[in-house]
Image: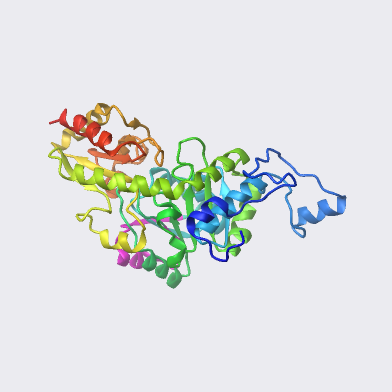
Amino acid sequence: MSLDHPDFDTRAVRAGTLRSEFHEHSEALFLTSSFVFDSAAQAAARFAGEDEGFVYSRFANPTVRMFEQRLASLEGGEDCLATSSGMAAILATCLATLRMGDHVLCGASVFGATTQLFSTLLARFGIEVSYVRGSDAQAWRDAVRPSTRLLYCESPSNPLMELVDLQAFAATGRAAGALTVVDNCLCTPALQQPLRFGVDLVIHSATKSIDGQGRVLGGAIVGRRDLIRDAVLPVLRTAGPSLSPFNAWILLKGLETLSLRLRAQSACAAQLARFLEGHPAVARVYYPGLDSHAQRDLAQRQQEAAGAVLSFDVGGPADDLRRRAWHTIDGTKLMSITGNLGDTRTTITHPASTTHGRLTAQQRQDAGIGEGLIRIAVGLESVADLQQDLAAALGRIG
């Protein structure tokens, strides 16, 4: 691109584009495992990292590199590495930055698989993990230990839409000499760029809104070049949690429409949240765009919009909440019952028995995930149709 400072939407379409000698307009799909060298000397230089160029698609591929550079541009990061999934991105970050005896401080309300990774797998390698309420900036500061090496959060969190004050979060990490990592999956760079607030690394499950149509898996790590190249790349090169070129090509196409989709989906989610808040069968709605959300002001400072995901508790007796939640979900006709989110098709799920089902009852309680909680990831259907669908489903439970 010839412009000095192109806008977000321009970079979403143009940034990172590499053209071959055929001068193709759309990004090329390089389906190759390896690359040919002009000489043995060039091969040696490439393997040693002394010569720029591609060696092996396990850790570098032209299509994947285009996706990495475009996402880095949108997040405002110096560099990016793509992985096979969002969980692979988290694992690669942990392998790159932690060792036995280190301590991880994590927000309590994070994705269930993230909790499983931290509390179960990392514990096997002598890494301690403790959890704090993400919205409590003082709790982060109080929980820091001399051995704390990593602070990790989601903002907004999945599924309770809890926000972390990113500026305070980054400051806590700097004071502790610890790395700060934010999962930006729900907002994406279209709505929020955590690096602007001093955070060290941003994690993405590109499977979600970056793809946007539920087609492929992918993940990414964005941040400072020294962290990406010196710490994370050796893990990717050796352990091989690689993003396939085909998936990278799909994700490139997703980035082109990311801002358009997220703006439209956020507007629809806000309208749906207001409807649910006024429904007699609903006990509480979790959505940072509502006046009732305790962190609405923070959301307005950190985010361009409140996002496309909302959750709500159905009302009723405590011992009947799961049945009532399942009955509501089963009563919808338009929404897809699936654990994925970020799709153009609206999805609905019961977190306590799906995305967070492998957590213990105590872990779910600590995270605030009750039996009556339902999560909706709003797509691009008519909001009037979605509202009608939910009204009918909620009407059946009284």
Name the residue: 77% across, 56% down.
48
Report x, y in % for residue 115: 40, 47
Tell me the quarter of the picture where residue 376 sits: top left
Q: Judge whether 178 appears above or below 360 on screen.
A: below
Residue nearest the viewer, comparing 313 with 277? 277
Q: Is residue 22 visible?
A: yes
Please state the horizontal and vertical placement of residue 92, each as a whole percent of the image. Answer: 55, 51
**x, y (%) of residue 55?**
74, 48
150, above or below 383, in the image: below
Along the line of sight, the residue nearer the viewer: 356 or 58: 58
Q: Is residue 159 visible?
A: no
Residue 124 vs residue 110, the one in the foreground: 110
**Which quadrant holds the N terminus?**
bottom right
Q: How many marks?
A: 0
- Quarter assignment of residue 250: top right
Q: Position of residue 379 (x, y in %)?
A: 36, 39
Name the residue rendered at 45%, 37% in the picture.
213
Instruction: Tell which residue pokes out farthest to the bottom in this image.
Output: 175
Residue in the picture at 74% in, 53% down = 53
For residue 155: magenta?
no
Residue for point 40% across, 69% down: 172
Quarter that holds the C terminus: top left
- Residue range of the region highlighted in magenta in the rendering: 128-152
Magenta span includes 129:
yes
- The front one of 230 and 219 is 219
Q: Is residue 279 left or right of residue 374?
A: left
**Which quarter of the picture shows residue 120?**
top left
